[in-house]
Amino acid sequence: MPAETHVEGVPIGRDEVLELVRDRLADILEIEPSEIAEGASFADDLDADSLALIELVEALEEELSERSAGFRIEDDDLEDLRTVRDAVDYVVSRLG
């Protein structure tokens, strides 16, 4: 990603969050980002286990904390994140 997208305080759009989730998940699962549909279930469609989801959360927190100080995905909310869309919607709502 270009450096100018990593500036604190710059709003991040839903499409950019989707791209970020796809890219990080693709790295973790060792697949192409294009293979990850927005409606894909982590467990059923992508065979992502709980460890993969924890890695995704850590990657998103690291990336997004640069834009939104203290960005965090709460552990209690993880069970509600079943699809890529769930994760994107959650991140977008937290960045508000």
Image (tube, rainbow, N blue to C red):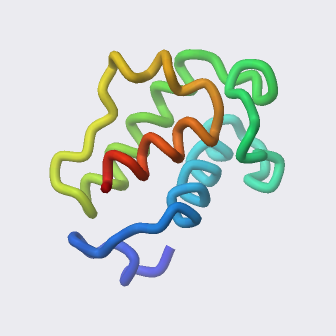
Report the label total.
0
Query: Above or below — where is 68 with respect to 28?
Result: below
Rendered view: 6 above or below 55: below
Position of residue 7 measured from the top left corner of the image (x, y, whole percent): 27, 75
Residue 4: % across, % down: 37, 83
Residue 9 in which image quadrant: bottom left
**On screen, residue 62 above or below 86:** below
Which quarter of the picture shows residue 36? top right
Q: Residue at x 31, y 56 (%)?
A: 96
In the image: residue 60, left or right of residue 14: left
User: Camera-side residue: 28 or 67?
Assistant: 67
Work out which residue is located at the far left of the displayed protein and give it. 69
Q: Residue at x 78, y 51 (%)?
A: 32
Q: Is residue 94 left or right of residue 53?
A: left
Q: Does residue 87 sit above or below 81 in this rendering? A: below
Q: Position of residue 1 (x, y in %)?
A: 50, 73
> Residue placed at 61% from the left, 38% from the top?
28
Relative horizontal placement of residue 14, taking residue 41 as reference (left or right): left
Q: Residue at x 83, y 47 (%)?
A: 35
Name the residue nearer the viewer: 29 or 43: 43
